[in-house]
Image (cartoon, rainbow, N blue to C red):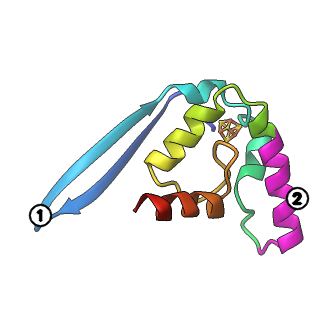
């Protein structure tokens, strides 16, 4: 979580030409335990990652999440925006995909 306050904007098509913009202000992120140098372990590296490396990286990230004061807000947010990448709120990408599938 690099910024204390993050605005997330996403544009999406609705019909022929109309575009809507959604903005969410995320104030809890300034208390995130993953801020700083640790944040790189929350996302896959830009190179191929072995399964064992991924498991170790995710386990380290989850340990940090379990001590984080905003874990619940983070997980709610990741589910709300259907975040597809990285560790959020102590959940992996695959774990959130299961939640998304069960919510459909
Ligand atoms: S729960 Fe994990 S991913 Fe979310 S803000 Fe805290 S440390 Fe970062």
Q: Residue furthest front?
A: 102
Task: Give the mark, 2 or 1, whose residue is nearer the N terminus.
Answer: 1
Quick check: 63 left or right of 10?
Answer: right
User: Nearest the camera: 57 or 38?
Assistant: 57
- Taking the magenta stretch, the answer to whether it contains residue 52 is yes
User: Percent x, y for residue 54?
Assistant: 81, 64
Q: Which residue is mark 2?
A: 56
Question: What percent of the width, then of the height, locates residue 103?
Answer: 43, 57
Q: Quadrant of residue 14?
A: bottom left
Please, what is the dominant secondary structure of the magenta stretch? helix
The x, y position of residue 97, in whole percent, is: 56, 63
Q: Residue at x 69, y 25 (%)?
A: 69
Q: Which residue is mark 1?
A: 17
On the image, the x and y values in percent for residue 85 come to: 60, 59
Q: Quadrant of residue 44?
A: bottom right
Q: Which residues are magenta?
A: 48-63
Write the residue at 65% across / 42% down: 89
């Amino acid at each position: 979580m690099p910024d204390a306050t993050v605005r997330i904007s996403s544009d999406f098509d609705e019909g022929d030409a109309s575009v809507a913009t959604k903005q969410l202000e995320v104030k809890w992120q300034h208390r995130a335990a993953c801020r700083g140098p640790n944040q790189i372990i929350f996302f896959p590296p830009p190179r191929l990652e072995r399964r064992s490396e991924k498991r170790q990286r995710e386990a380290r990230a989850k340990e940090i999440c379990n001590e984080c004061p905003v874990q619940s807000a983070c997980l709610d947010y990741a589910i709300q925006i259907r975040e597809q990448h990285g560790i959020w709120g102590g959940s992996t990408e695959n774990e959130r995909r299961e939640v998304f599938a069960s919510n459909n």
